[in-house]
Image (cartoon, grey):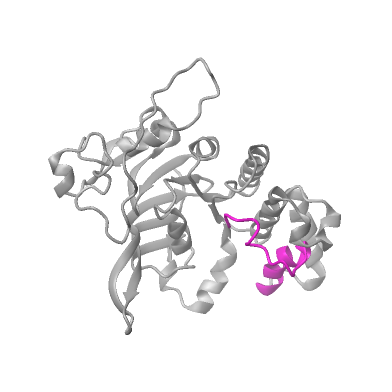
């Protein structure tokens, strides 16, 4: 029986739209709109979707870098958003984040040793004397040479900077890491190295990941379960094999049809979605996807589809099922 580590229930994060001289709230951007999922210990949960669908906001709201609008996030039975500042601070080392952009997420005025060691000393996990040994140990794990410790971020390539970001997260011995598109800014050859580093770290420390990505081929390689997001909502969820072999939602099918196949003899029918993503400030009524769906029926324009179980561990929100 898998041990439950993180539980997200009916999570919502709305950003107010203010206008006029008095800055009155005239509406909301529904970045995350009522999503639920569970991540078990030692498991990688992939969250996929187009840019702007709310993936990164979900990760940041889970870690309480954004305050929630509604819903619950439980880490090992502790409700994250109910914690006082000092209680949250004590829990912080156990929940870390690897940011998307390796160029802007590192302080350019700090050396690699200071970047990785800062949180260790701040959280009093090691003494100042022992910090260097711990930093060198984590750098070695992440494929960084000992002489890099005195260098600054601008002296490194994108792939090396992302390794520094991963080392910074791993230094605190976390149990859960939100990896927000950690390879999207990197070359394909470097991507595989970073993905393998994440997998090796997971096996060594029994880490759990929320892996946010728009690249379905990367997700297939690293994730155990996959959730598909569209306009702030989770529209399909399944284990990896179930989703890739039998996608149910028309949006998931369209995403998977765009994944390149490395065999030139195989011809796959591309599903081209019409139109643009609607605004999260004013999502369509009924099913949010109906404006672009090739199978849309009259009911899709009126009623919100129920998120329901179709198969063992396979859920979908679609009127076709």
Residue at 67% across / 37% down in the picture? 189
Q: Position of residue 254 (x, y in %)?
A: 37, 34
Residue 312 seen in the current view: yes
Q: Which quarter of the rendered picture does the N terminus lie within? A: top left
Indicate left or right for 321 with 175 as reference: left
Give the residues drawn in magenta, as a range: 99-123
In the foreground, 83 or 25: 25
Specify whether residue 113 is painted magenta: yes
Q: Residue furthest top?
A: 265
Indicate left or right for 160 with 227 as reference: right
Q: Residue furthest bottom?
A: 22
Q: Position of residue 18 (x, y in %)?
A: 33, 75
Indicate left or right for 88 with 109 as reference: left
Q: Position of residue 29 (x, y in %)?
A: 33, 64
Counting the numbered discs, the total is 0
Residue at 34% across / 71% down in the picture? 16
**Position of 309 relative to 174 (above/below):** above
Specify whether residue 45 is painted magenta: no
Residue 249 seen in the current view: no
Q: Which quarter of the rendered picture does the C terminus lie within? A: top left
State which quadrant residue 68 falls in.
Answer: bottom left
Q: Residue furthest right?
A: 147
In the foreground, 32 or 175: 32
């Amino acid at each position: 029986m898998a041990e439950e580590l993180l539980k997200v229930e009916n999570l919502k994060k709305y950003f107010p739209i203010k206008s006029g001289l008095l800055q009155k709230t005239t509406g909301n951007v529904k970045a995350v709109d009522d999503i639920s999922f569970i991540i078990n210990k030692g498991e990688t949960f992939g969250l996929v979707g187009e840019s702007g669908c709310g993936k990164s906001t979900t990760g940041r709201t889970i870690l309480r870098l954004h305050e929630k609008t509604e819903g619950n996030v439980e880490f090992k039975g502790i409700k994250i958003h109910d914690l006082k500042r000092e209680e949250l601070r004590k829990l912080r080392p156990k929940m870390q984040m690897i940011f998307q952009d390796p160029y802007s997420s590192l302080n350019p005025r700090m050396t690699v040793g200071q970047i990785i060691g800062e949180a260790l000393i701040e959280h009093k996990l090691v003494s100042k004397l022992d910090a260097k040994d711990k930093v060198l140990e984590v750098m070695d794990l992440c494929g960084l040479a000992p002489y890099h410790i005195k260098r600054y971020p601008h002296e490194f390539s994108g792939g090396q900077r992302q390794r520094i970001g991963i080392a910074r997260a791993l230094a605190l011995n976390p149990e859960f890491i939100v990896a927000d598109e950690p390879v999207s800014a990197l070359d394909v050859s470097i991507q595989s190295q970073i993905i393998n580093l994440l997998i090796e770290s997971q096996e060594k420390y029994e880490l759990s990941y929320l892996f946010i990505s728009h690249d379905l081929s990367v997700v297939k390689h690293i994730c155990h379960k996959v959730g598909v997001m569209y306009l702030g909502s989770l529209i399909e969820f399944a284990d990896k094999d179930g989703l890739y072999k039998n996608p149910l939602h028309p949006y998931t099918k369209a995403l998977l049809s765009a994944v390149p196949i490395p065999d030139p003899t195989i011809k796959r029918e591309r599903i081209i979605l019409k139109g643009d993503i609607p605004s999260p400030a004013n999502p369509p009524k009924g099913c949010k996807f109906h404006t672009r769906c090739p199978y849309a029926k009259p009911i899709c324009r009126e009623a919100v589809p129920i998120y329901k179980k179709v198969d063992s561990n396979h859920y979908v929100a679609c009127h076709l099922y």
